[in-house]
Image (cartoon, helix red, strand yellow):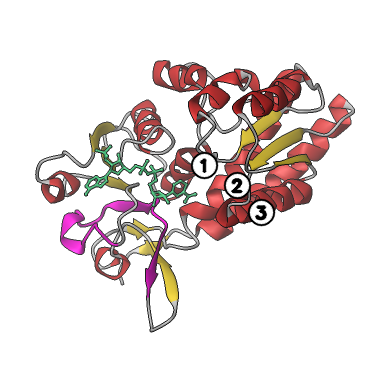
Amino acid sequence: MSAALIDGKAVAASLRERIADDVADFAASAGRVPGLAVVLVGDDAASAVYVRNKAAACAAAGIAGHEHRLPADTSEEALLAVVLGLNADPSVDGILVQLPLPPQIDASRILAAISADKDVDGFHATNAGRLATGLPGFVPCTPLGCLHLIRSVGPDLRGAEAVVIGRSNIVGKPMAALLLGADCTVTIAHSRTRDLPEVARRADILVAAVGRPEMVRGDWVKPGAIVIDVGINRIASTPGRTKLVGDVHFAEASAVARAITPVPGGVGPMTIAMLLANTLEAARRHAGLA
Ligand code: NDP
């Protein structure tokens, strides 16, 4: 391996320490702590773990976590009522509705109902529009974390060729918008892209957000590129056991890249750190301290 390892766990840990200090400063000025409401509908095991991790991270940073657990058969109207209640609650600065939602609920209707100034996930169309037009708003946590990691190894991105594989609203599109905002020349690739390896090889900064284990091979990577692997895929390893891998073939790509994120321990830990940062930012805005 010749690439430098981008240690998301370490970067996230130091960020979380800084956020905890800033939360304490906020509390001293505002006379209250920031609050994050996390809404979980149903008992999806992975979602329950994410919500537990978010609650623990909030507590460690001094942010009040308000957890709302609703049964799997909750109606759309009942969930809407919860969201509207949180919109009106002055102790709540950020609202996060854990996805996926059960099939009887239209997630887009719920996300649209969250007040844009409490939308710390950055999924509301108003915040997506603000990002696209360069206005201040809330940016989705995962791509925000990726940009932070990219800057940790490449502070000046002006003029760099960036290729983002994946065009989802929560990762690929906002990632591309952030890189464009950093003056990169950005290409967004997806399942219909022709000759994807050739497109990927143009990238000084290559972000893979696809959900396909080890799809990006070593010969897709330009020598000296920065490679950010967003993918989290569980695959079989030794008989009866599984392991997590990214969308990038780590062993091959790390022989070619200048810097690369591992899976796990790369992008993943950054997502929660950015959620805390967005919640603190929301609290500052609500308190008139931003
Ligand atoms: P989506 O399934 O919403 O989007 C996947 C994207 O990949 C789509 O745009 C799709 O293209 C594209 N794609 C699929 N197959 C191919 C292919 N063969 N070649 C090129 N592009 C392809 O996924 P998400 O954006 O939500 O997540 C992507 C990955 O990131 C997942 O592994 C997910 O688990 C992980 N993730 C990790 C997070 C973290 O905290 N580390 C947070 C969020 C996600 P098309 O639009 O044409 O269908």
Question: Could one spot residue 290 in this view of the protein?
Answer: no
The image shows residue 260 at horizontal and vertical percentages of 36, 58
SS of the residue under disc 3: helix
Residue 272 is marked as 2
The residue mark sitting in front, 1 or 3, is 1
The image shows residue 180 at horizontal and vertical percentages of 33, 28
SS of the residue under disc 2: helix
Q: In the image, what residue occupies the spot 37% across and 73% down? A: 236
**In-front residue for pair 278/24:** 278
Specify which label sits upstream in the sequence, 3 or 2.
Answer: 3
Q: Residue tagged by mark 1?
A: 100
Rendered image quadrant of residue 194: top left
For badge 1, the amino acid type reads Pro
Residue 53 is marked as 3
| Quadrant containing the C terminus in the rendered view | top right
Q: Label 2: few (<14), some or many (≥20) within 10 Å?
A: many
The residue mark sitting in front, 2 or 1, is 1
For badge 2, the amino acid type reads Ile
Question: Marks 3 and 2: CB-CB under 8 Å?
Answer: yes
Rendered image quadrant of residue 75: top right
